[in-house]
Amino acid sequence: MKVIVLFVFVLGALSAAGEDFFAKVGGKVTLNCGVSSYTHSSLFLFSVLGGVDLARRSVVRETNLEISSVKETDAREFKCLADGTRHEHSLSVFSVLVSVKPSAVLKLNDEATLQCEVKGQHHGCDVEWRRLNTYLPSNTSTLQLKPVKTSHNGPWLCIVTCGRNTFIEPLAITVQEPPTTTTTTTPPTTLKNITSFVTSVQGTANDCPLGLSCWMWIAIGVCCQFGMLLIVCVIVLCKCMRRRTVCEERRSSNTYV
């Protein structure tokens, strides 16, 4: 391991109490040296016991040290020297894992478990679930949903509080409602009317005489009318033929005279 000096003027000697800083893996953290200003005739130095990778992701801005893309291996001690005073700080790095069992897509009235797990050097950070307009037990990393309701649908927040630092890890839950079955049914009033109509037709058919249906009687009546019309046509045709014969005989007798 080697000491990487990020910014230095003059060496100092005295020591002062440091501060504990917290960072989430993948995030960004700003370490304050502990002084608001310093004189250029005095020392200002941030020393980091680490590798080149940490130095590349670190930058000094005024009296602060900013580290981006924080990794678990960045957890260590940091020393800052300013105005003849040395400040020793510590950086704790952790990761927040949120999960839903059995899955993030839930069915109505099922059961589910929300888990917010903090891994790493968190030194007793408080963990709790929060949701807008919904009462939840405080300081609870595991939350049971029994049963799953429509109000559980949407975003959830896992809040990790470490001293004066607050970290938020979001989680989205989807609650699926059972599909509504749309079956085409005949309205009761319409069905009742159809039943009454069929019953009335059947009743009318049963009232016809001789046990025959009304349609049979209608057919017989039509046939009878057709037969009578045929007879009338035959009679008229016969009379026409007789009259024609008589006329021809008279013409023949007049011709011989």
Image: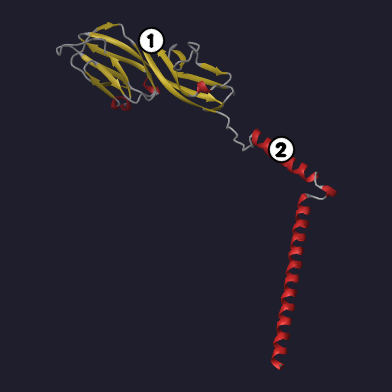
Foreground: 99 or 124?
Answer: 99
Q: Residue furthest right?
A: 210
Q: CA distance from mark 1 to mark 2?
A: 80 Å
Q: Is residue 83 left or right of residue 257?
A: left
Q: 155 above or below 237?
A: above
Which quarter of the picture shows residue 47? top left
Neighbour tally class for label 2: few under 14, some 14-19, many 20 plus, Cα within 10 Å: few
Q: Amino acid at mark 2?
A: Ser
> Can you see residue 93?
no
Q: Nearer the viewer, residue 186 or 147?
A: 186
Q: Residues within 10 Å of mark 1 (few under 14, many from 20)?
A: few
Residue at the spot of label 1: 163
Q: Decide if residue 215 is on the left or right side of residue 60.
A: right
Image location (x, y in percent) of residue 194? 68, 39
- Residue 257's place in the image compared with 192, above or below, is below
Residue topped by disc 2 = 196
Q: Which residue type does callout 1 highlight?
A: Gly
Regarding residue 99, the answer to whether it shows in the image is yes
Which quadrant would the C terminus be assigned to in this image? bottom right
Q: Secondary structure at mark 2?
A: helix
Position of residue 130 measured from the top left corner of the image (x, y, whole percent): 45, 16
**Considering only order in the chain, which callout, 2 or 1, is on the residue closer to the N terminus?**
1
Residue 209 vertical position relative to residue 140 in the rendered view, above or below: below
Q: Which residue occupies the extreme left position in the image?
A: 41
Which quarter of the figure has residue 192?
Answer: top right
Q: Is residue 91 left or right of residue 147?
A: left
Residue 147 screen position, x and y as percent: 58, 20
